[in-house]
Amino acid sequence: MRYVIIGSGNISNTYVEAISEIGGEVAGVVSRSGKSPASYPALPSWHSLDDVDQPYDAVCVTTPNGLHHEGIIAAAHHGKHALCEKPLDISIEAMDAAVSACRKADVTLAVAYQRRTAPDNRAVKKLLEQNAFGRVFAVDLVAKFYRPQSYYDSGDYRGGLAIDGGGPFMQQACHNLDIYTWFFGKPTQVVSMLDRYTHDIEAEDHGAALMRHENGMIGTVVSSTATKPGFAARLDIHSEKGSVTLTDDVITHWSIDGVDNPTDTSFEYNHNGATSATVSDTSAHKEILQDFERAVKTGSTPIGNAESARLTTELILMIYRGNLVK
């Protein structure tokens, strides 16, 4: 497939590289600044999708969070499929507008929650769907990352509410919260405590939330960009048949009665999001792109379909609304 990248920030370089590695093509880049990605300065660039004068099949939306719906809606207006960088967007209204535009245009919309492609995450998801763990009563997610102040100073929107949509819950940990909602759905009750501790930003840089699901399951999540030097993300699942720990999408503890550990020891995705926003390993992005292309060609549901990706933003918004620190 042939793509136009919407947005020329750091993550756009990852998409250009991943597209070329799966045999696709990049027609060029749409950017408000008129610039091409730093690593690919020779790519054609336009200020608007209306200006694109080359054929293409789909767009990759890599703009800041709160602008995602604009790129998706523009693509749908042109009858093009859209793969959107996470999250789908930062508000219910924006997500609804994007999904509605794609539905009306009959184009595929997917979100790049590429951690869903990790073999161990897929294996756990399948076992949960089969009720292989029995009743799951507790899930604890810890996403203690670190970003220096220079990261937030690199863009006026970083760490703000209008465009970034929040701090680490909306930005860095949304990948991990997406696995949580992909596995367990959205809770019915959320209380949280969020605040700023080490950064000069508008949003939170550290916080914790307590969640209760309709089936009685209790979930907890801690998310941070203040916990220096940054730590691997960890998800602990506790059920009546035992416990499972996933560390950065790899099963690192397994004690489920009567169920063999399905870990894939060949998995080598090494994006160290705990300490850096740079993505040097494109393997997971290649998988999400290949899945997106399959969905476009066959009419199947993409692994990062918009309806399930929406739940992640909904959960994050619930965490923000439940903040007891005012």
Image: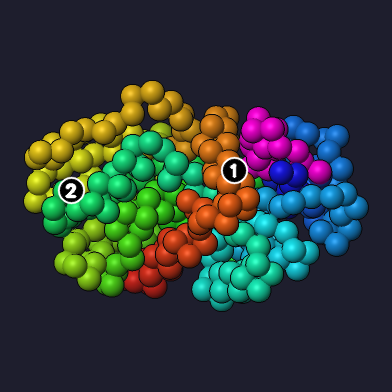
Residue 313 percent coordinates (x, y): 46, 63
Could you tell me which residue is drawn at 20 percent across and 41 percent down? Answer: 244
* Magenta stretch, residue numbers: 10-27
**Residue that lies at the very extreme toward the front in this rendered image:** 298
Q: Identity of the amino acid at label 1?
A: Leu
Residue identifier under label 1: 289
Determine the secondary structure under disc 2: loop
| Closer-to-camera residue (196/24) | 24
Q: Which residue shows up at 48% across the image and 51% down it?
A: 303
Q: Where, quadrant-wise, is the N terminus in this rendering?
A: top right
Find residue 278 and report its horizontal and vertical position in percent. Answer: 57, 35
In this rendering, the answer to whether 97 lies above or below 246 is below
Q: Relative to 279, say whether 34 is above or below.
A: below
Q: Is residue 45 left or right of residue 314?
A: right
Quick check: 246 above or below 200?
above
Question: Can residue 130 be seen in the rendering of this structure?
Answer: yes
Tell me where residue 144 sits by quadrant: top left
- Quadrant of the image containing the C terminus: bottom left
Label disc, if present, on residue 113 of the rendered structure: none
Q: Residue at x 43, y 26 (%)?
A: 268
Question: In the image, 233: left or right of 96?
Answer: left
Q: Which residue is mark 2?
A: 132
As measured in the structure, the alpha-carbon distance from the residue carrying label 1 to the one carrying label 2 is 30 Å
Decide which of tag 1 and tag 2 comes sooner along the chain.
2
Dominant SS of magenta comes to: helix
Q: Is residue 238 left or right of residue 103?
A: left
Q: Can residue 198 be seen in the rendering of this structure? A: no
- Magenta residue check for 12: yes
Residue 147 vs residue 136, the one in the foreground: 136
- The amino acid type found where label 2 is placed reads Ala
Tell me the crowding category of disc 1: few under 14, some 14 to 19, or many 20 or more residues within 10 angstroms, Cα based: many
The image shows residue 77 at horizontal and vertical percentages of 75, 68
